Image (cartoon, grey):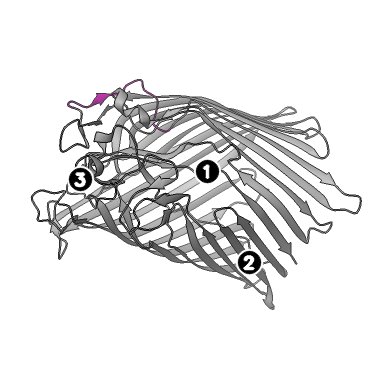
Amino acid sequence: GGAIRAITKDPGDGSLEIAGKAGDYAERRLAIRTGGPLADRWRGQISAAIDRRDGFASNLVPSGRGSADDLDRQAYRGKLLWDVTDTVQAKLGLSWWKYTDWAGRDLTAAGVPEANRGAALYGGVTSYERDEFATALEGDNDLREAAADLRFDVTLGDLQLASVTTYAQTSFEQTFDVDASSVALTDLEATEPSDTWTQDFQLLSPDSAPFPWLAGAHLYRQDASNLYVFPDTVSAQPAFPVGTDVSNGLQEVVTEAYAVFAQAAFPFRQRWTATLGGRWSRERKSATVETVPNAVTNAPTPYSDARDWDDFTPRLALEYRGDFGLAYVSYARGFKSGGYNYPASLNPVLNPETIESYELGFKADLASDRLRLRSALFYYDVKDLQVSRGGAGQFITTENAASATVRGLEIDVTAAVTRRLSLEAAIALVDSEYTDYIAGVLVPLAVPPYGSAPLAGGLDVKGRPLLRSPDQAAYLGIRYEGQFARGGRIPVSIGYSYKDDYYFDFSPIAATEWLKQDAYGVLNARVAYASANDGWEIGVWGTNLADASYYEDAVVQSASSRVSYADPRTYGIDFKLRR
């Protein structure tokens, strides 16, 4: 178990920063951060950010929500730092955010017309265009989170002890048009609240220790529930009357996890260091599914299940520091716990995923530190790989592939060509394949009820590359900083990223080849002017300047085949003020 934790800047000695942005699609952003001393041994900081933008895609249904892929977000955070004594420091953070937009909801049809049941069977409106979508859904989503974190840093003689406690309460209420048509065929109302608590302890040896080490413990608990309701206004479920609300049940999942870990470095023979570490993790998940009041529950209820998993994940590394740089070889084992799909009473329990990782790398700063090189060869052996895909139902589910291997090479080079010009280049070459996986796949139905149905016997994908994994990816960046005689600066940055083709899901026949994303590249740039004292800066920017058209997601399910497009070309101005 674990959680993503954002690390924010500590309060300083007194500052004010204001940043703003304005662009096409009526984009505007304003962010403010200020803080400083409050009293002896006390410092504080507050920040706020508001983002607004019109949608990239327009709705073809006049009665539905006007656009999708818009932004309507706000976030606030406060941080308090207290130097309790010369050896104890406490930090308290409070945050709250709210999203009401339809980011990523530009669901448009894909594949053959028969694959989209809402249009083919019920005569609904749909779209295959990048800047259009069709839905009768109205209103905004409501996603919000309130969170707190408390950290203590304590000096215990030569040792450093850290304690971090976090709590987050989330509330997600949102709607999805799963069939990507104007017909209310599989329109989904989702309610997903959760409460998450974590506690971490970490003890570090002094830097001067002959064998530097760290040790710690992690505790985690989450109480989460999922309630999905389909207002069945066109009788997509023939067994239920028109207008019946249908659900797969109210599911509650409780996760309890804890882990202990330690790592130590052992220098020897001046230039060599061996690192040994390990983590023991244990996790328990329990799931219940109950009947939903005022709706037909289309899943077995009541349902109850609980599972326990544990694993030991070691890490071993050997480093050599020479005059040329650092060379290393490492081995590590990783563990991702199992879990439950929704609804748990209709889906098999997800088994844990394990990975054996081997890496050989080299890091160097050359030419008087004007050339930085980072490279790594890696090999991963994955068992029970967890794969998230569409399926015969209306939900994205995660299933276990039996095994997979990934091997590759990554190289990252940064060069200071002149005092003002620097170049960055990176490339990743990956050879991945499933070594044992019979995947359930869907193929279009050419006759009513249309949509898609499972391919008999599944599809043996042994030897195929991992989904969403391009064989090649690269990046090239250029940074130039012009200088005025009076001290002002003109920072210029240009970046181009490239990805080779890959599949979002398996394609067993020509009619599903739209699941393949062709290779594409994205060009971004920014030019600015910064004052001599860095007190203010103003710039012009552009993203996806060549207006590359590519997918963020592509899904095939029983009622629809659909895609969501990535952002088109955008441009605008921005500014920063610092005091």
Q: Nearer the viewer, mark 2 or mark 3?
A: 3
Asked if residue 478 lies in the magenta stretch, the reply is no
- Does residue 309 appear to the left or right of 164 in the view shown? left
Residue occupied by mark 3:
122
Residue at the spot 79% in from the left edge and 37% down from the top edge = 421
Does residue 223 lie above or below 332 as drawn? below
In terms of secondary structure, what is the magenta stretch mainly?
A: loop
Q: Position of residue 149 (x, y in %)?
A: 50, 65
Amino acid under disc 3: Tyr
Q: Position of residue 523 (x, y in %)?
A: 61, 37
Q: Secondary structure at mark 3?
A: loop
Amino acid under disc 2: Ile
Count of residue discs: 3
Q: Secondary structure at mark 2?
A: strand
Please rate how many residues cluster around mark 2, counting C-alpha atoms within 10 Å: few if below 14, some from 14 to 19, many from 20.
some
Point out which mark residue 32 bears: 2
Q: Report whether residue 388 is seen.
A: no
Range drawn in magenta: 456-468
Front in this rendered view, residue 441 or 336: 441
- In terms of sequence position, does the residue under pointer 2 or pointer 1 come before the other? 2
Amino acid under disc 1: Pro
Residue at the spot 51% in from the left edge and 50% down from the top edge = 215
Q: Secondary structure at mark 1?
A: loop
- Does residue 157 appear to the left or right of 97 in the view shown? right
- In terms of sequence position, does the residue under pointer 3 or pointer 1 come before the other? 3
The Cα–Cα distance between marks 2 and 1, rounded to whole angstroms, is: 28 Å
Front in this rendered view, residue 262 or 489: 489
Res. 390 image quadrant: top left
Point out which mark residue 495 bears: none
Please rate how many residues cluster around mark 1, counting C-alpha atoms within 10 Å: few if below 14, some from 14 to 19, many from 20.
some
Q: Quadrant of the C terminus?
A: bottom right
Point out which mark residue 568 bears: 1
